[in-house]
Image (cartoon, grey):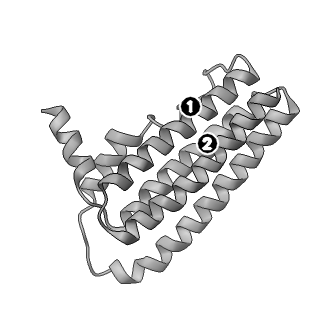
Amino acid sequence: MEKEKTEGLSRASFQCIDAIEISLFIEKEGLFFYESAGKKIQNPQVREMFSRLADEEREHIQSLQEKSRYLQPAIAGGNRPKEHLTRFISEELKGKIFPAMNASQDIDSDKQALELGIESEQRSIEMLQSLLEKEKKLDVKVIFSHLLVEEKKHLLMLQDLKTKL
């Protein structure tokens, strides 16, 4: 029964504003991860990379928020239910892409921090590819595709740095 519910969540089509909200959620989790992990890193190159990625996440968040504000007048009268989106985020995304970072979570090494970043970007890419495969609406696909390109770029940056260390 639980599996059917999850499959139903991921099969249902999203609206453009939903795609923005999903992308915002992923970017905010990424920002929190890169900022939190960055404080625990010793190697200046790795610390600089995490700082750069956090800055990029901030830029993506700002851009997505602007798109959301632009769409608000168009959807203001719709008063559409958000339970589908809320459940999807809660069941499919929360804590499943980027690790939940808190004060008690230890990062034992800079290498481990890099690995966590790489694994998180890979999970984000897999989720976005899955959403793209199931999505029919072009405007929604464009939003997921844009984020997918950015996540692939982050993955390559992290993998490149890992090979240099």
Residue plotted at (54% across, 67% down)? 65
Q: Amino acid at mark 1?
A: Glu
Callout 1: 10 Å neighbours few (<14), some, many (20+)?
Answer: some
Q: Which mark is residue 81?
A: none
The residue that appears at 57% across and 55% down in the rendered structure is 149
The quarter of the picture where residue 73 lies is: bottom left
Callout 2: SS: helix
Q: Position of residue 154 (x, y in %)?
A: 65, 46
Q: Residue at x 67, y 35 (%)?
A: 36
Which residue is label 2 attached to?
Answer: 32
The vertical placement of 81 against 103, above or below, is below
Q: Say left or right for 92 vs 68.
A: left
Residue 43, picture quadrant: top right
The quadrant of the image that shows the C terminus is top right
Image mark count = 2
Q: Residue at point 42% right, 44% down?
A: 127
Residue linked to disc 1: 119
Residue 42 in the image, given as x and y percentages of width and height: 83, 26
Within 10 angstroms of label 2, few (less than 14), some, or many (20 or more) residues?
Answer: some
Left or right position of 91 against 96: left
The image quadrant where one finds the N terminus is top left
| 135 or 26: nearer the viewer | 135
Q: Farthest residue to the top: give it.
A: 108
